[in-house]
Amino acid sequence: MNAKFQARRRRPGFPSASSFSLLLLAIVPAVAATPDWPSRPAPRPDPALEARIEKLLAGMSLAQKVGQMTQPEIKSITPAEVTRYSIGSVLNGGGTWPGNNKQAGVGDWLALAKAYHQASLAAPGGIPLIWGTDAVHGHNNVLGATLFPHNIGLGASGDAALVEEIAAATAKAVRSTGIRWVFAPTIAVARDARWGRTYESFSENPALVARLGAAHVRGLQGQLKGDANVVATAKHFIGDGGTELGRDQGVNRSDRAELMAVHGQGYLAALDAGAQTVMASFNSWHEEAAGVGYGKLHGSHALLTGLLKERLGFDGLLVSDWNGIGQVQGCSNASCPQAIKAGIDMVMVPEDWRAFIANTIAEVERGEIPQARIDDAVRRILRVKLRAGLFDKAPGEGVWDGKAEALQARELARRAARQTLVLLKNNGGVLPLTRGKRILVVGKSADSLPNQAGGWTLTWQGTENRSSDFPAATTILAGLREFGELQFSETAEGVDVRRFDAVIAVIGETPYAEGHGDIPASGTLQHSSRYPEDLAVLKKVSGQGVPVVTVFLSGRTVYANDLINLSDAFVAAWLPGSEGGGVADLLFRGAPSYDFTARLPFAWPAAICPGKTRPLFALGYGLSYAGKPASVPRLPVQQSSGGCAAATEMGIFVKSNQPPYQLQVGSLDGSWPEAALGGDLNASLGYPSEAAPRVSVSTVQINTQQDARRVVWQGPARLFAGSAQKAALQTYPNGALVFDTVVEQAPSASVRLAMGCGAGCAGMLELGDVLRRLGVGKRSTVKVPLSCFAAAGAELSRIEQPFSLAADAPFTAAFANIRVQAGAALDADALKCSQLKLQR
Ligand code: BGC
Ligand code: BGC
């Protein structure tokens, strides 16, 4: 297979690697003995451009070079600091807007872009900064911008021309705000629907991903220097879609041939299409067959330099992902010689950029990072900036800059939505519906723009949005109303279904994005167990002699046999974006008449656990009005019994609340009411009230983005998680309560860690000494054997509160990954019960 790659890719007469990477080979220990990677010729160097790069580089100090390689987040850096530190790039993360104002308009975005740009020109050398943003389905951080279907839907369309058109419209929208770089396309090949980023993947089929990914790059970049072009990013290199159990940022265990044949195809195509930047992936790669672990991609010279830059001839810039360097063994967010030596050129270091700059300069001065590597990184950054015309045109000077109308492409988005819907079932030809009939619309997503848009919409996770945050958008309900009058009832409560000719149920998943959207190994693909309200509403309306048409919104394929049985027609509508009219267009007979053209980009599962059986509907399946009628028989319904993996872990708070648990705060004496912690990732909230807080809680990062809650005790209070459902913790052999923590202010007095088991039943331990010994500002994992709680009086067979931490002020610490883990009590670093004696 590799021979085939080479035969197809190698164009005679081209060098197989750029002179710069050859230079690099001489300096960095070569891992190049990887004969079975494919090879792809690097673009022919442009001598005039390279000469200009050398001239700029010659005038730069080490500090300026490191500044050039640094990409802070706009919340954490002012224009004045851009000048002072010679910063090369900024990004706005998902859910960051100029001035922290969600309502910010094109003018506000452009003004900030201008300010950063001018600040960069004011630094010595005057190299323009480049701003990057996640415009992954339209310019999705900007209020009122048209939202296109997420990639999963575009994969269903299979239409490269459509994808290119959408990318071009997105680029224009991005340019209107003065931004020149987009962190898209995601060319992940998702292989396990439990992955919360499945919808960012076009397909499980590498060839389709490659075709659409390349089209997306062409659409964004155009000629690169045009007024409606932006720099594209192929992400996340490499293997992000193939992690074990579909875990975000997890381990990919593909062998080398599969890594390339499945996860690498998109890169070959994107690079051929001219993608100027690549983003490294959070995952690690373990070459199982060879028994070699390469660790996190961010630290892998073999993959970032050996494969991407040398074998695949990538001469653009490689950017790290959000604090991705901090995940490399031995690194922190603020220091990672390994990542830079491995080949990262631009470092996304959203908050800790000051320390990063200081550390990196020192590391170069000490010889830990070769000067030549820094020069290579800066050359690549300058090359991209020059190619993309950053030196030629400032924000405000392009024809679209500041033009609000550039954010709108509603007709295109409506057509796109139409092209993404897959008809899975249409028994008895209930669809298309005839206009003028009595229609009942039900379901929680019929009138919900947040559900229609999904994650990466105005906020990172797509949560915290309301329909009023979408001033230029049409719900599916409003789209249906274009076809005649109808009645809407979200739950169908008290509605006499028999008065109608047809029911349209719009149901599905609610928004999520990376990490938070993963279905854990202890869960299943069964939709109804996560969203019981959808099954409930279908049960209300079906079986009454009135046909039921289900429109199902989701970011992945799920087990839905129960829902499909309750529906006469079933449409997989993915995450269609701002134009609900495009969904409605397909359901009615009328002029113009549209037909379903989309086909499944992922196989649709027949079982609640991935990969266990043949799919219910194969990859590429999809019905149409014009095609042969087909009837889907009644499907067997599997009862969900536990999760897909043997339970070795019970999550309590892992990135977010793990149902049935919910993190809460409360008083120690009942003097103020218990409160569930808010889900707003951006807010810092005081409890019981903002005015007189006893405890304040905000969201921070311990391991991965926003995975932790930081708790400031301002009085006596406790942090706890509970549920009326009793957990049988003795089923976790040698189990321990485990959590990650960073203590910011050590407790001066006692801190009680307890497990509660109902009235009069608890096991309480003293954790104060342990916490004090952890030291301030360090990340630690605390493991408390369940046997210690049992010895202190907890009945492990009926635990209602598996985690409760009571303290007095002052005490500040962050907590993440709170769980019960089998076997952890045997770990060498588990605490001993004798260290936890309550002193009272
Ligand atoms: C994500 C960013 C997001 C940010 C929001 C990060 O963890 O990776 O993309 O924008 O959180 O604060
Ligand atoms: C995501 C990237 C994104 C970046 C910046 C990360 O957490 O993995 O896809 O581009 O944040 O927002």
Image (cartoon, helix red, strand yellow):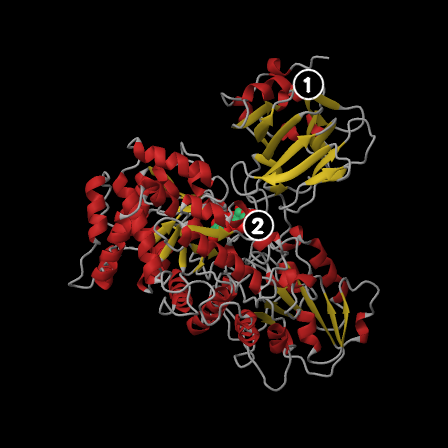
- Residue 307 placed where, x, y %? 29, 49
- Looking at the image, is mark 1 or mark 2 nearer the viewer? 1
Name the residue beneath numbered marker 1: 750
Residue type at tag 1: Ser
Residue located at (62% from left, 68% from top): 570
Q: Is disc 1 placed on a helix, strand or loop?
A: loop
Q: Earlier in the sequence, mark 1 or mark 2?
A: 2
In this view, 430 is above or below 9? below
Residue 520 is drawn in which quadrant? Answer: top right
Residue 254 appearing in the image: yes
Q: Which image quadrant: the N terminus?
A: bottom left
Task: State if disc 2 and disc 1 touch (CB < 8 Å).
Answer: no
Label 1 crowd bin: few (<14), some (14–19), many (20+), radius 10 Å: some
Q: Give residue 731's position: percent from left, percent from top.
A: 62, 30
- Whether ligand 1 has any atom under 8 Å from the Cβ at mark 1 is answered as no
Cα–Cα span, label 1 and label 2: 37 Å
Q: Nearer the viewer, residue 742 or 565?
A: 742
Query: In this image, 116 relative to 754: left or right?
Result: left
Q: Secondary structure at mark 2?
A: loop
Query: Which of the pair 252/653 is nearer the observer?
Result: 653
* Residue type beneath disc 2: Gly
**Residue 255 position in % (x across, y down):** 34, 46
Q: Is residue 339 above or below residue 239?
A: above
The residue lying toward the viewer, choosing from 226 and 515, is: 226
Q: Position of residue 641 (x, y in %)?
A: 63, 45
Tell whether circle 2 marks a residue whose Cβ is less than 8 angstroms from ligand 2. Answer: no
Q: Residues within 10 Å of mark 2 (few under 14, many from 20)?
A: many
Question: How many numbered marks does the figure carry?
Answer: 2
Residue 326 found in image quarter: top left
Q: The C terminus is located in which quarter?
A: top right
Q: What residue did someone put label 2 on?
A: 517
